[in-house]
Structures are given as structure tokens and as C-alpha cells.
């Protein structure tokens, strides 16, 4: 694959994952505390957040492998810091959701 194609794929992947992660984190922050169980909230805050976390990890592994095999420039390595930041905030979506549901919904039943 040509370097230009690789750079475009990495850029598009990082942008799409960033926007999706931002939407999930902001939605979770604006909806908290979760005092009522809704399937749609569970799907977004647990399911989508976990899928995004896996995709970020896959992108990070791809970048590291590309750098090691010299198919990707070293300039992509700072993106790993952004991956860690996104993983950190995405981790709080499922954990915060489960914590709220346990605190407010499970105790009331």
C-alpha cells in the first residue's frame, strides 16, 4: 500500500473514532446520573463505548506494527497519546453507567 493511502486511512480512522468517542462521552456526561434503566443508554454507554475502546486499541496496535515494519512514519507515534486519552475517558462511560445503575436502580428494587 502506498504511504499516502496508509496516512489517509490512519487519519480517517482517528477522526471517526475521535468524533464517535466524543459523542459517547458527552452524552454520558450530560445524562448522568442514570436513575432509570433504559436499554438505549446501556447500549451506548456500555456496548458502543466498549467497541470504541477495542477499535482504539486496534488502531494503536496497527500504528506500532506499522512503525516497527517501517510502513508507517514515526510521526504517527504521538497519536498513541491521544489513544490513551480517549481510552481513559471512554473507560468512564461503562464504569460510571454501571455505578449509577447499581446505586440508584438496583438498590431501589
Image (tube, rainbow, N blue to C red):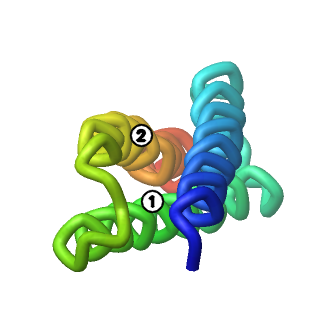
Which residue lies at the image location 71% right of the left edge and 34% below the top edge? 23
In the rendered view, tell whether residue 92 sits above or below residue 56.
Answer: above
The percent coordinates of residue 29 (x first, y second) are: 59, 24
Q: Quadrant of residue 96?
A: top left
Write down the residue under mark 2.
Answer: 86
Query: Circle 1 sits in a helix, a strand or a loop, which is it?
Result: helix
Q: Residue furthest front?
A: 2
Residue 36 versus residue 6: which sits nearer the camera? 6
The percent coordinates of residue 33 (x first, y second) are: 58, 27
Question: Which image quarter is the C terminus in?
Answer: bottom right
Query: Circle 2 sits in a helix, a strand or a loop, which is it?
Result: helix
From where the camera sits, is residue 34 visible?
no
Which residue lies at the image location 58% right of the left edge and 34% below the top edge? 25
Of the two numbered discs 2 and 1 on the same chain, state the one appearing first in sequence.
1
The percent coordinates of residue 1 (x first, y second) are: 57, 79
The image's mark for residue 56 is 1
In the rendered view, tell whether residue 75 sits above or below residue 72.
Answer: above
Q: Quadrant of residue 2?
A: bottom right
The percent coordinates of residue 68 (x first, y second) are: 17, 72
**Left or right relative to 47: residue 37:** right
From where the camera sits, is residue 22 visible?
yes
Query: Alpha-carbon distance for marks 2 and 1?
Result: 8 Å
Amino acid at each position: 500500500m502506498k504511504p499516502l493511502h496508509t496516512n489517509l486511512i490512519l487519519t480517517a480512522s482517528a477522526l471517526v473514532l475521535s468524533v464517535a468517542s466524543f459523542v459517547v462521552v458527552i452524552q454520558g456526561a450530560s445524562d448522568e446520573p442514570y436513575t432509570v434503566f433504559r436499554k438505549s443508554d446501556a447500549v451506548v454507554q456500555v456496548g458502543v463505548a466498549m467497541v470504541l475502546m477495542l477499535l482504539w486499541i486496534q488502531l494503536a496496535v496497527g500504528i506500532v506494527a506499522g512503525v516497527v515494519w517501517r510502513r508507517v512514519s514515526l510521526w504517527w507515534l504521538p497519536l498513541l497519546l491521544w489513544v490513551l486519552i480517549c481510552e481513559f475517558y471512554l473507560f468512564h462511560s461503562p464504569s460510571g453507567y454501571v455505578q449509577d445503575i447499581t446505586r440508584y436502580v438496583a438498590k431501589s428494587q
